[in-house]
Amino acid sequence: MANTFEIVDLHCRIEEREILKGLNLVVRKGEVHALMGPNGSGKSTLANAIMGHPKYEVTAGQILMKGENILEMDPDERARKGLFLAFQYPCEVPGVRVGNFLRLACTARAGKEIDMMEFYDKLELKMKVLDMDEKFRNRYLNEGFSGGEKKRNEILQMMMLEPEFAVLDETDSGLDIDALKVVSRGVNELRGPDLGVLIITHYERILRYISPDFVHIMVDGKIVKSGGADLAAHLEEHGYDWIVKEAEATPVKS
Amino acid sequence: MSATTEPFVHGAYKEGFHDDLKTLRTSRKGASHEVIDYMCDVKGEPDWMRQFRHRSLDIFLTKELPPWLPGLRDEIAYDDITYYASPVEKSANRWEDVPEEIRRTYDKLGIAKEEQKMLGGLGAQIDSEMAYHNIQESLSKKGVVFLSCDEGLKQYPDIFKEHFAKSIPPEDNKFAALNSAFWSGGSFVYIPKGVKCDVPLSVYFRINAEQFGQFERTLIICEDDSFCHYVEGCSAPIYTTNSLHSAVVEIFVKERARCRYTTIQNWSTDVYNLVTKRAFVYKKGVMEWVDGNLGSGRTVKYPSCYMVGEGAHGEILSLASADKNMWQDAGGKLVFYAPNCTGRINSKSISGHGGRSSYRGLVQVSPEATNCRVQVNCDALILDEQSRSDTYPVMEIDGDLATVEHEASVSNVSDEQLFYLMSRGIRKEDAVSMIVNGFIEPIVKELPMEFAVEINRLINLQMEGSVG
């Protein structure tokens, strides 16, 4: 229990439309799961529901982090308990410098004052891993960032905050191959027995650099197929059509 | 999750206390010629000033209010206001010579003696008179003059008369006329040719009396190639009645000189703050207004730069925060009378708890002012549905080849921004505060460190309880 992130029969809707229709998933620390699916299957809704976006209304089910239901918690409390979401479209916060923002976030995560020297040393180190110029920390958060810079910045935050469970929402989208390698390097560095990861992606491409332990396929708000890394390769070759048809023909048992 | 709606408890205004100071001199209530004669006698002023005051009062009594301020005719009880009151005998230039009870007031406000060490000069006005005025010896040796305006008139009558009311005559507007009639206190600053006054000259204005009118008058003259930075702060007690603060500030920035004037206005909401500020900028001179309005129930203030010499530059950074029971009507004016000049207005306003902020700006380019460039940015942040923000920009462009850019934006603290920051563990109230402080950062970073800290403190106080 203490090492699991468990989604049980999750139903979620946005603006009266049900998007998640009974989703089940268990991620243990030390594991990397990939969640794949065609456009509109509900992948990003899942990411937002996990983090607690107020526009996403969970109508049934549970999300248990280390055995504790987090659905009643505000996003900040979830984060302080060790949950992280790398955003698909991180928003701009003008006038707030990356360095200051990270310092406040790390202080919140730690629940106490943090040592400034240690913080800046760590920041410098992590920025090197991600090939980021040190000037970056004085820039305003996501303002004028290229797509690649935004994604790197998300991974930087993850490395600084050291979550126990992390959801990466289409972190690979819009990245060229070099940026994808850098971002993957960051994730792989953090990967280990203390972290469970859920990578949400449309393409198999990122999974060449971060090899998953499990792959799940989501169609119409539910996971319809689960398997190992080979499932992703199969998808890349055959597309989503076969699995959508299969799902329509045989409703999945829950 | 929008940033709204809890009633604001006005316990945060820590400057709202009042002290029982013994008033040594006080005039009768009401704006009358009799009060003017009383003041002139007390101050021992020359006849020309007495005549000027009387003439100004006549202008005040007959002049119409600006068309956008009709409410101020009835809202302000002009007859119940005391136009002159002084708790001090004379302005001291040693802190020890300031009466102890007044020193205690300033101690409570944090205008401790130590602060002088950071400054080129420090002045402190209470009600109508300057209780303290002092300048570093190194600056006075270079010929820098930093006195109360009254002392300026006495000690430097020629320079004073040459500039006084030349950029803002009493006819300019009703409140300039009122100030011209009853002015008292304020600063007289003279920076000689080529002298760079690197450390700020600072003045703190305090209203202590009730139903009182403070009319300080400041005159700053920067001769060719000089520099100075003047900073002012202010506060007042919270009473149940209203007071009036109506200052006039005139600045002359001569050739290639540069002047920066920074204001952190933090009057209590009892105070009507109706101020006229204007700078004449000569050839290649640079004038910068940094105008922070965080208090006062009603502010009407548009610092202005008149570019009168070729290649002059005028800059106005305006920051307004309108909390509950406040209307910040702020902005700026750039007026071009000479060719090849440039100007910029950058205005940021925040409205919360039902507060209202207006940007009112004028850009005027006269026919002889060819090839001028102007940039105006005004951004408003509205924190809840009870609050309001308006923009009233006026452009009158007659000069050829003028380049004028105007950009305006209105934004809210967005759900997406809040969610993003909160998803990193940051509490909602801290997230709102981050977003608001980020919004004003481009202006705050222009301020001296201690003022930036003070602005952030005041804004954060106003943010308290602004999240549902």
Image (cartoon, coloured by chain):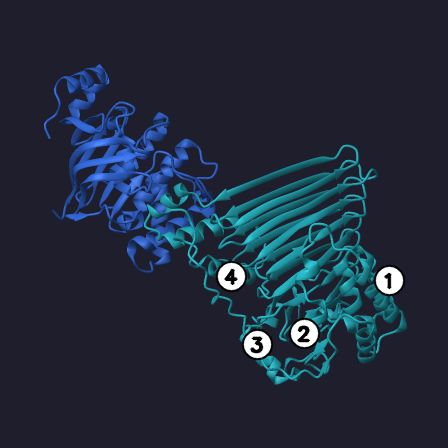
Chain colours: A blue, B cyan
Amino acid found under the numbered disc labelled 1:
Glu
Mark 1, Cα crowd under 10 Å, few <14 / some 14-19 / many 20+, is: few
Amino acid found under the numbered disc labelled 2:
Asp
Q: CA distance from mark 1 to mark 3?
A: 39 Å
Residue marked by disc 2: B127
Q: CA distance from mark 4 to mark 1?
A: 39 Å
Chain of the residue that carries numbered disc 4 in the rendered image: B
Nearer the observer: mark 2 or 1; the answer is: 2
Q: Position of residue A179 (x, y in %)?
A: 36, 30
Q: Is A19 placed left or right of B430 in the picture?
A: left
Q: Is A201 placed left or right of A242 in the picture?
A: right
Using the rendered image, report if marks 2 and 1 lie on a common chain: yes
Q: Earlier in the sequence, mark 1 or mark 3?
A: 3
Mark 2, Cα crowd under 10 Å, few <14 / some 14-19 / many 20+, is: many
Residue B311, picture quadrant: top right
Identify the secondary structure beneath mark 1.
Answer: helix
Q: Position of residue A160 (x, y in %)?
A: 32, 47
Using the rendered image, report if marks 4 and 1 lie on a common chain: yes
Query: In the image, which disc is placed on residue B85?
Result: none
Residue marked by disc 4: B458
Residue marked by disc 3: B18
The answer to the question of whether label 4 and label 3 lie on touching residues, with beta carbons closer than 8 A, is no
Residue marked by disc 1: B162
Q: Is B152 placed left or right of B210 in the picture?
A: right
